[in-house]
């Protein structure tokens, strides 16, 4: 019995020892697990801290890169604004003196055919013989190419000669080419030709355009909007803004006067005025289509293979001289800014817009140089003033709306058009400009002054079968 009890006690003690051992092992296991969990948490925390430091460092690097990029493009924009603004201002002042001289000596128009021969000779023997004009600049923006330095020299001289002898042309074509060429050449000198040439050319366009027109807001947006309609290139916003503002200031310091117009008798918006401006805008869309069609038709006619360039330009110049004698007016020579001012004052000849289209088509459709935008202002202002008299709406208001609406119709740049309206006319009647711009943009279809321009998004859907 005692042996049995003794065995039981031994077994009990053994079971107790095994139980204690098992508990100790469990505790050690639990401790290891806890230590493992803690270590995992520590390792995770270290990883997170390391990643956070990496992300913070990356943000610092990104911010530093952004600040450096901003500083570089801002400085480049200012430099382009100074140089292109100076050259464009000299060009604008020269055109002003040329215009004054020609108006004092209207017989200068008789030399236009011979001036055309000189322009053809210049373009044939100086630089590449091909002449793509503003389309070269637009293609350079889209394809990231450069605008050669000699483009600025040729367009400066050729536009001055065209205006001196009474060709019907504007100046913005010269501004875009001057600015693009100067900016590209400057980038090459500074060894920045690989630093986004698209932005480089846009920067020069904005600077020269702002210097000549005194519209830095519109100039900034126009350079980004005109190439690919519906897809603005926002990376160019900083340099284009700085270039346009500096170019405009340089022009102001040099005495280039900004174009500002005062409208009168602007009525409040009502259902009646809304409908009348809607009709006016639809008419402006048709006029802008007619303007583009006529210019392209003249260009096709005078550049046919059977034509010798010297013969074509001499013929076109002779026709301009004969038409000037026939209409017995110098209103259609040069930019015609004085006619635009008269139209906004409410005075216009009914046929003025049609005659300006013909004179401009003969001038720019051959080989004379200049721009199409100021002539589009002329056409829009004179048509608007005439339409306003028919509609019984303020001719001054209609001239302003017509001027901006036709510009929108031929360039397909509605945002730039609204900004031009604000900078040239102020915000009085801005709702009428809004109506004119959006309606003209929509109804003018896919016609454009620039064959290199691309309209990214359809204005309206095609009717499905």
Image (cartoon, rainbow, N blue to C red):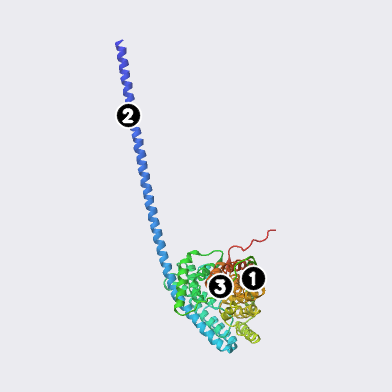
Question: Does residue 226 appear in the picture of this structure?
Answer: no
- Taking depth in this image into account, of 450 and 263 the one nearest to the observer is 263
Q: Camera-side residue: 441 or 199?
A: 441
Which residue is at a point 31% across and 21% down the rendered structure image?
Answer: 14
Kind of element beneath mark 1:
helix
Quarter of the image for residue 418 reads bottom right
Tell me: residue 295, above or below residue 68: below
Residue in view at x 51 percent, y 83 percent: 96
The local crowd at label 3, few if under 14, some if 14 to 19, many if 20 or more residues have their Cα within 10 Å, is some
Asked which quadrant contains residue 406, the reply is bottom right
Q: Which mark is residue 24?
A: 2
Residue 90 percent across, percent down from the top left: 47, 80
Against 280, residue 5 (above or below) is above
Which residue is outermost to the top? Answer: 1
Task: Give the mark count.
Answer: 3
Where is residue 301 drawn, in percent x and y? 65, 78
Q: How far apart are marks 3 and 1 (CA)?
A: 30 Å
Residue with the mark numbered 3: 135
The answer to whether residue 219 is seen in the rendering is yes
Which quarter shows the C terminus? bottom right
Counting from the top left corner in percent of width and height, residue 292 is at 62, 73
Closest to the camera, between mark 1 and mark 2, is 1
Camera-side residue of 107 and 364: 107
Q: How much space separates mark 2 and mark 3, taking CA atoms? A: 88 Å
- Residue under pointer 1: 280
Q: Is residue 121 left or right of residue 272?
A: left
Circle 3 SS class: helix
Q: Which of marks 2 and 3 is nearer the N terminus?
A: 2
| Residue 59 horizontal side relative to residue 354, left or right | left
Where's the N terminus, which quadrant?
top left
Position of residue 275 relative to residue 38, above or below, is below
């Amino acid at each position: 019995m005692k042996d049995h009890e003794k065995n039981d006690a031994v077994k009990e003690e053994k079971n107790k020892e095994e139980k204690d051992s098992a508990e100790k092992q469990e505790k050690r296991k639990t401790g290891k697990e806890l230590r493992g969990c803690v270590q995992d948490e520590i390792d995770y925390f270290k990883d997170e801290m390391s990643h956070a430091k990496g992300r913070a460092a990356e943000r610092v690097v990104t911010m530093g890169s952004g600040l450096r990029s901003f500083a570089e493009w801002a400085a480049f924009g200012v430099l382009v604004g100074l140089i292109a603004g100076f050259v464009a201002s000299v060009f604008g002042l020269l055109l002003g003196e040329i215009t004054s001289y020609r108006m004092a000596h209207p017989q200068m128009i008789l030399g236009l055919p011979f001036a055309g021969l000189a322009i053809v000779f210049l373009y044939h023997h100086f630089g590449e013989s091909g002449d793509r004009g503003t389309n070269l600049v637009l293609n350079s923006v889209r394809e990231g190419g450069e605008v050669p330095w000699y483009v600025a020299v040729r367009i400066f001289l050729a536009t001055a000669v065209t205006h001196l002898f009474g060709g019907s042309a504007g100046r913005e074509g010269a501004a875009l080419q001057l600015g693009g060429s100067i900016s590209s050449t400057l980038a090459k000198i500074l060894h920045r030709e690989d630093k986004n040439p698209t932005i480089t050319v846009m920067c020069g366009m904005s600077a020269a355009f702002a210097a000549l027109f005194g519209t830095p807001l519109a100039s900034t947006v126009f350079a980004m909007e005109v190439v690919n309609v519906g897809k603005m290139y926002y990376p160019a916003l900083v340099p284009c803004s700085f270039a346009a503002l500096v170019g405009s200031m340089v022009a102001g310091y040099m005495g280039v006067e900004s174009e500002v117009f005062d409208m009168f008798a602007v009525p409040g918006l009502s259902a009646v005025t809304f409908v009348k401006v809607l009709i006016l805008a639809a008419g402006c869309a048709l006029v802008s289509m007619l303007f583009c069609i006529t210019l392209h038709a003249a260009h096709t006619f005078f550049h046919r293979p059977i034509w010798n360039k010297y013969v074509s330009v001499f013929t076109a110049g002779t026709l301009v001289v004969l038409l000037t004698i026939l209409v017995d007016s110098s209103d259609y020579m040069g930019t015609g800014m004085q006619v635009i001012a008269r139209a906004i004052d409410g005075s216009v000849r009914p046929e003025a817009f049609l005659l300006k289209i013909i004179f401009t088509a003969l001038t720019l459709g051959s080989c004379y140089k200049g721009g199409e935008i100021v002539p589009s202002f002329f056409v829009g202002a004179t048509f608007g003033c005439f339409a306003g008299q028919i509609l019984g709406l303020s001719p001054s208001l209609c001239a302003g709306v017509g001027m901006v609406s036709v510009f929108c119709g031929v360039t397909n740049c509605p945002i730039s058009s609204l900004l031009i309206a604000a900078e040239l006319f102020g915000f009085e009647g801005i709702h009428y400009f809004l109506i004119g711009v959006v309606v003209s943009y929509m109804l003018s279809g896919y016609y454009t002054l620039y064959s290199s321009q691309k309209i990214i998004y359809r204005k309206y859907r095609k009717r499905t079968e």
